[in-house]
Amino acid sequence: MTPEQKARQEIDRQLEQCGWIVQDFRDMNISAGLGVAIRNFSLKTGFADYMLYADRKALGVIEAKPEGHTLTGVETQSGKYLDGLPNGLPNYRLPLPFAYESTTTITHFTNALEPDARSREVFSFHRPEELIRLVTLDQQMRGLLRQMPPLNMQRLWRVQVESIQNLEASLADNRPRSLIQMATGSGKTYTAVSFSYRLIKFGRVRRILFLVDRNNLGKQTLNEFQQFVSPYTNRKFTEEYTVQHLKRNSIDPASKVCITTIQRLYSMLKGEEDFLEENEETSLFETESPLIKEPLPVVYNPKIPIETFDVIVVDECHRSIYNIWRQVLEYFDAYLIGLTATPTMQTIGFFRGNMVQDYTHEQAVADGVNVGYDVYRIETKVSRDGAKLVREPGVFVPHRDRRTKSKKYKELDDDLPYAATQLDRDVVAENQIRLVVRTFKEKLPEIFPGRTEVPKTLVFAKTDLHAEDIVRIMREEFGKGNDFCQKITSKTTGRKPEDLISEFRNSYNPRIAVTVDMIATGTDVKPLECLLFMRNIRSLSYFEQMKGRGCRVVDPDALQMVTPDAKTKTHFVIVDAVGVCEDEKTATKPLDRKPTVALDKIMGMVGAGAADADLVSTLAARLARLDRQLSPSQKTAVAKEAGGKDLATLCTSLLQSIDADVTTKQAIEKFQIPEGQEPTEKQLQQVEQEHMREALKPFHNPKLRNTILAARDSFKVIDESTKDKVLRAGFDATALEKAKAMLTSFRQFIEDNKDEIEALKVLYSRPYRAGLRYGQVKELAGAIQKPPHQLHPERLWQAFEAVEPDKVKGHGGKQLVDVIALVKHALDPDTPLAPVLLTVEERYQQWLVDQEQAGAKFTPEQRRWLDAVRDHIASSLSIEQDDFDGVPFSQIGGLGRAYELFGDRLPEILEDLNARLAA
C-alpha cells in the first residue's frame, strides 16, 4: 500500500467517525445519509480526493496527502477545486465554502465564508450538521467579532476595560490564542464573565468552555456568572443563558457556558461514563509529575465533536495544561483565551506571545488594587540542617503509617540522619513544628504590633498529614479549641471544604486555616493578613499564586467584622519558616529599592533632572502607598498640578518606563533592528533613559512636588527526641532598614524643632520646668505628621519595636499622648518606651499604696471616681474641677457628688494626682 493509499484509508476512518458516509464516485448515493463524502470526484478543474455533500448539496472538498507532506502549499489546489463544481449540481453556494487538506496526522480547514479567510489546524473533520449550520448562517462568528458594539463600561474599571477591548481586537484579527495577565484581586473572573457575555450575545458564540484548576474554583466561577447583571439588558447572565458546572460527564445541549476542570474534560473525551468529584479537588500545581514526558493521548470522541466549543477560557491553570494536557485543549476548533496573574515563559509561548493585557502585581499595588507584603523569617536549626536519630538498643521509636495514620513502635535498624527536605515527608520532627508554631505565637505582637487578635492566617503545609500535625500543635500552643484552627484540604471530611472556606472568609473563627492545596490558588479570602509557609515551593508561578492569597484589598468594615482590632489592611506578612522567600524564584520584587531615602530628597533629585531605574522604582512605590492614604480633595489637588493625571496613572507611567519588555520593543522599533536580532545594551540604555525622563517629566513641576509632599501621610518516622532551637526570628533586612530610617528622621525632627515647639521645650528641660498641656501635645503630634518628616505615632512605635524590641514596654502609639513617651525615649534611649496609659497606671497604683500607708481609706464609690480621674489624666495629661462637668463625671453626679465624696480634700487630691501621674 502506497503512502497515499494509507492516508486515504485513515481519512476514510476519520470521516466515518465524524458522521460521514464514505463512497466511491461510481457508487455515490447522496441521499444515503445527512453527510456523504465521495472519493475521486470529477470536477471542471480536476479530481477532488473527496467531495462533501450535506443534506444532498455539495459544500466542500478534502485534499489528501501522505503523512509528512506540508499542507500550506496544497491550499491553492483545494481552492481551485472549490471553483470547479460542474454546472447544474446542487450546492449551497459557489464557490464551495469549505476546504480541508489532510495528511491524517495534520488537518487544515478553511471556511471561505469568513472575512480574510485563512486555514487553521483542526483535530479532525467537522460533522455534517456543523457544516450545514455554518453555510446557512447569515453571518459567520469571525465576521461578527469584527463588528462588536462599543463596550458598556458600567461596573468595569480601567484594566478590565483595556483587557476586554484588547481581547476583542485580537479576536477580530482572528488571532487563535490570547493571554490576559491580571494581578490577583484585579477582577480577572469578572472580566472573563463580561467578555463571555459579549461573545455570546454579540458574537453569537454558541458555547464557551471555562476551565478551572479545581472543582472548588468552578463553584466560585459559577457564582460569578450567577451574580453577573448585564449592563445591556439589566438581567442576570443565568436568566438569559444556561451556565453548567459539570458534575457528570455530559454536556447540556442548551448550555452556553460549561465550567469544568481539565481532568474531567479528559475523562469525557476518553468516553468514561463518570468521574468522581474528589478527583477534581487537587490542584494541578500539586499533581504535576516529572515522570510524564509527553502530552496525554487524545482520540476523537463522536459524542463530543471538535465544534462543541467555540471559545475555551483557561483560568489560572498550572503550566502542565499547556504541556501534558495541551492536546485536550487543541482537540476543539475554538479560540483559546488564557487568564493568569503569573504567566511563565511556557505559558506565553503556548499563547504565541499574544499577551493582550499585562497588568502586574507591582502595577496593582500602585493602583491600590493589591497591598504589598513584608517578610518575617523564622529559622530553626532542624529546619535548616536536618538532624540525626541515633539508634539505641531498647529504645522504641514511633513509626506512622502513611495510609492508616496508625503508629507502631519499634527500634531503628540503624542511625537515621535526615535532611531538612525530608521533614514532614519521611520524618516528622514534632519539636521542629512546635518550635515554629510557638515562635510564631510569641512573635505575633512584633509582627502585628498593637494587636491582640490573631490575624486571619493561612498556613501552607507539605502534605495532609503535615497539616494534621500543624492543626493539632496550633491548638495546643495557642490553648484554643477546634474552631480556632481548622484544616482545609481536599481530604477534609465531615464538612464541605467550600463551607469551611466561607467560614474562614466571613466569620471570626477559624483564626488559622491550614491547607495543602485548597486555598493555594484562586480562592478569595480578602481579610487574610498573614501567610505562614511551612513548606518550600520550587515553582515560581505556584509561589506567586500562594502569595496572591494575601494581597487582596478589603474594606475596613469587612475586615473588622472578622478581626475586630484591625483598623485597615495596608499590607500582609509572609512568615517564612522554610526559606521559601530566599530562593530567587519570585518575580514580584519589592518596588522600594531605596527605603532609607526620604521622599522629599527623592523629589529633589527628580526635580534636578536625575533619572535611573532605582529612583523611578522607588518613587513609584512611595506614590503607590501615598495614593491609598489621600483624601478625595488631596487627589483632586494632585491631579490639578499633574495635568489631570492621578497618582495611579503617574505610577503606571513610571513602572512602564523601566519595563524591560517595553524597552526592548521600543528599541527594536527605534533602531529598526532586523527580525531575529536583539538591541545592544547601549541601545536599550538609551531608550530606557528616554522613557524614564518622559515619565519623570511631570515631577519637574515644583507645584506638583510640593502638593505631593504636603499631602503625604496625613493620614514519617516521628522524631520525638531531637531538640530544636530558633536561629533567627525577625523581619527581613529591608523592613528593618525602613524602621531605622524612620527613627533617624524622628530624632532629626526633635533636634530641628527643640526651640520651636512648646512641648519639645518642656520635654528638653532638665528638670522639667512645667507640666505639659494637652494642646501642646496636640501641636507636637500635628507637626510630626507634616512634611518633610511625615511620621505617625503608631508607625513610630512599631519602628521602635522592630529596632529596639528589648526597650519597648507594651504597645502604644494609638493615643495622642503617647507622643510624649516617644519623644522621651528618643531623648533618653535608656528610658523604656511605655504607653502613657501604662505609666499612669503604674504611678496610680503606687499613689494608692502611699495613701494606704498614710492611713487613707477609700470606699468602692470613691475608688470608681479615682479610677475615672486616672483615666482622664492618662488621656488628657491633667484634670481640673471644670472637667467634672463633662463625661463620664457628669453621668455619676458631677462636681457636686465629688465634693460629697471627698469633701474639702478634693482640690488637694486632684493637685496630688496631677503632679504624681501626669507626664
Image (cartoon, rainbow, N blue to C red):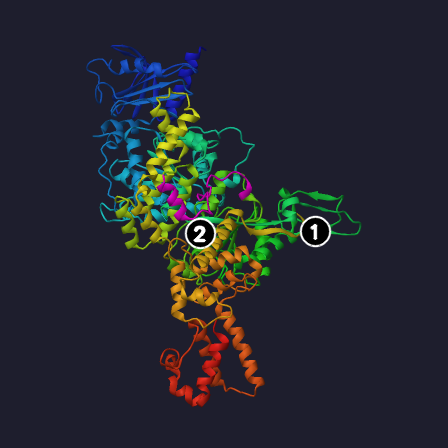
**In x, y percent, where is residue 596?**
47, 47
Asked if residue 65 is positioned above or below residue 863 in the image, the reply reads above
**Magenta stretch encompasses residue 720:** no
Three-letter code, disc 2: His
Q: Is 393 drawn above or below residue 916 in the view shown?
A: above
CA–CA distance in space, label 2 to label 1: 36 Å
Residue drawn at x 57%, y 86% is 854
Residue tagged 1: 722
As helix, strand or loop, the secondary structure at mark 2 comes to strand
Which kind of residue does numbered mark 1 sit on? Thr
Q: Secondary structure at mark 1?
A: loop
Q: Is residue 335 left or right of residue 410?
A: left
774 sits to left or right of 540: left
Q: Quadrant of the N terminus?
A: top left
Q: Tell me the residue that label 2 is attached to.
A: 571
Residue 312 appears in the rendering: no
**Discs 2/1, front:** 2
